[in-house]
Image (cartoon, grey):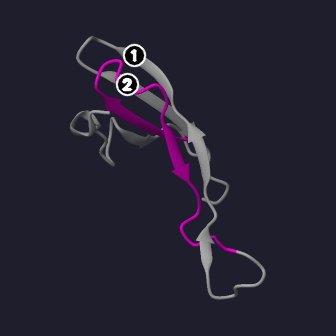
Amino acid sequence: MNLAAVFHRTCAPWCFAQDDQTLVFRLQTAPNDVTAAELLVGDPFDWVKANEADTQQFLWNAEKLPLTKTGSDGLHDWWEVRWSPPYR
């Protein structure tokens, strides 16, 4: 995988609110270099115990969302996912 070709920024047009409930995330990769992409999303303050026996270790309660390939021009492939956070 060509890591130098992976591109994302936390500003439009790469990440923005589509409406008052939906966020859009976009990613750019090298053409035909990536077969699938996922985005980890969740509340940054939502942590769960790693297991019942260990009360000291917690894990971030996140979910994986698959990105959909939305286009390619021979120089780049573009990926996108929409997410509606449960807490706003």
In percent of width and height, residue 52 lies at 78, 80
Tell how many labels: 2
Q: Residues within 10 Å of mark 1 (few under 14, many from 20)?
A: few
Cα–Cα gap, marks 1 and 2: 5 Å
Q: Quadrant of residue 33?
A: top left
Three-letter amino acid code at the position of disc 1:
Gly
Q: Amino acid at mark 2?
A: Trp
With respect to residue 40, does 37 lie above or below? Answer: above
The location of residue 46, given as percent across then percent down, is: 63, 70
User: In this picture, which residue range is highlighted in magenta?
Assistant: 22-50
**Outermost residue, top direction?**
74
Quadrant in which the C terminus appears: bottom right
Q: Residue 14's spot in the image, x, y percent? A: 35, 38
Which SS class for mark 2? strand
Q: Which mark is residue 71?
A: 1
Picture quarter with the N terminus: top left
Is residue 45 or residue 23 the one in the foreground?
45
* Residue plotted at (30% across, 45% down): 9
Instruction: Report which quarter residue 48 is drawn in.
Output: bottom right
Q: Nearer the viewer, residue 57 or 16?
A: 57
Residue in the image at 58% along x and 63% along y: 43
Q: Which residue is mark 2?
A: 78
Q: Are marks 1 and 2 in contact (CB under 8 Å)?
A: yes
In the picture, measured across the screen, residue 7 lies left or right of residue 38, that is: left
Q: Secondary structure at mark 1?
A: strand
Residue drawn at x 73%, y 76% is 51
Q: Is residue 72 left or right of residue 59?
A: left
Q: Is residue 17 magenta?
A: no
Q: Nearer the viewer, residue 43 or 12?
A: 43
